[in-house]
Amino acid sequence: MSGIVIIGAGHAGGSAAGFLRQYGYTGHITLIGAEPYLPYQRPPLSKAWLKGEASLDDLYLRGDTFYTDQNIDAHVNTQAVSIDRIGKTVTLLGGITLPYDHLILATGSKARPFPAPGADRVPHHLLRTLDDAEALKNALHPGHRIGLIGAGYVGLEVAASARHLGCEVTVFERESRILARVASPALSNFFTEMHMGRGVGIFTEAAITELSLGQGDKKVVHLADGRTHEFDLLLVGIGALANDDLAQAAGLECANGIVVDAEARASDEHIFAIGDVTSRTLPVYEGRFRLESVPNALEQAKQAAAAITGYKAPMVETPWFWSDQYEFKLQIAGLLRPDCRTIVRGDPAGGAFSVFHLDGQNRLMTAECISKPADFMAAKLLIAKGVALDDAIADPEVSLKPYLQ
Ligand code: FAD
């Protein structure tokens, strides 16, 4: 019996299975996941889960009877090892072969390994899966010294959670500021102050030359300037890599992820790819992007399910992302571009403000909003409509609504 095979039971794969049924697909759906869990949400792993504020039930995308109720054949702890595009089959570890009419690749991404000498000998944590998060949670004890390598969103969320748990936290960032690749200098400054104000040590331009083991199992970070720092626990959070090996081995076009079109279709008309593993285009922004966000996973899951079933294609959304650190909720609409000028709307010292990024024609390209949900909602629409703004918006009392008309 053919049908649809989905490889990867994460946010994108699990959602695609649900959308296929919602859009009226009645054929066979098989969902294959390498992890021992049904699809769950990763965002809480660095936040509520670490702090002990979320249960397993809170993490799951759907209730445990959803898959049987919807006649979705979900297999966890099972890995797909090859794709035969001519025979239209997928082979699983252990040799079972599944035929497909359509294949959806939702294999996500994996934590980038730390390349410094000694990283192979010195135990350190990565954070991608629920098992990773559970191991980290069990190792975070009050008073322990935690070293975080990499000041991206995941690293900084862990820093905030670890401080909440009473750990001593030090962050090492290779670039000249935290969040250097993913946020404006204004936002980096804000979070630097927030973290340092809560007792987190931050080293920027920190070139780590080596990791070693110290006395009593301490983990030692060696910096290029000769200084060393000892920790009870190290976490490496230096980004993620696309899990596109299966696709590459099957000869699908890949370029930092599986290349897909606006319907999430890969370079084979019977194969779709969705979520973190894809390289996609977007309206408004030129180029190809590998987005690592829940909204992207959901949007592409809808695109693939719609294309397969003939259901109405979803509206393309302005890409967005969120991060929670301490009491601050960051929401970002749009993608950062280096060629924009910025307008700060509101006062960062008050803990609620937005940074608006305008292109040469004053069109909004990106908005970074701290605890400003109304600015964020407006910005998503303003970006999609290509509306030009002016300097008056620096005043938070100036409404954004008139610009939307
Ligand atoms: P994944 O969730 O990675 O799922 C892919 C699944 O495929 C995995 O379970 C993997 O084991 C499986 N798989 C891979 N290869 C195979 C194979 N050959 N056979 C079978 N199964 C396979 N996003 C936000 O928008 N906001 C946030 O605040 C946020 N916080 C995050 C915090 C953390 C700690 C992490 C790790 C991510 C966070 N993200 C956040 C990103 C978000 O979780 C991802 O963008 C999203 O999970 C992508 O979904 P996905 O299904 O594409 O990939």
Image (cartoon, helix red, strand yellow):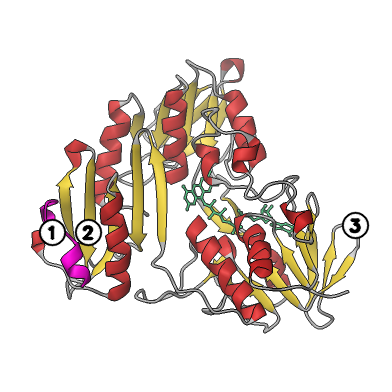
Report the amino acid beneath label 1. Answer: Ile
Q: How many residues crowd around disc 3 within 10 Å: few (fewer than 14), some, or many (20 or more)?
A: few
CA gap, disc 1 to disc 3?
60 Å
Is label 2's Cβ within 8 Å of ligand 1? Answer: no
Q: Which residue is mark 3?
A: 94
CA gap, disc 3 to disc 2?
52 Å
**What are the residue bounds of the magenta stretch?**
394-405
Q: Earlier in the sequence, mark 2 or mark 1?
A: 2
- Please provide percent x and percent y for residue 136: 59, 31
Q: Earlier in the sequence, mark 3 or mark 2?
A: 3
Name the quadrant containing residue 83: bottom right
Q: Which residue is mark 2?
A: 356
| Residue 123 at least partly seen | no
- Please provide percent x and percent y for residue 230: 48, 22
Q: Is residue 40 left or right of residue 300?
A: right
Residue at x 67% of width, y 51% of height: 39
Residue at x 61% of width, y 58% of height: 108
Q: Nearer the viewer, mark 1 or mark 3?
A: 1
Q: Find numbered disc 1 in the image and state the secondary structure of the residue it sits on.
A: helix
- Foreground of the two, 303 or 269: 303
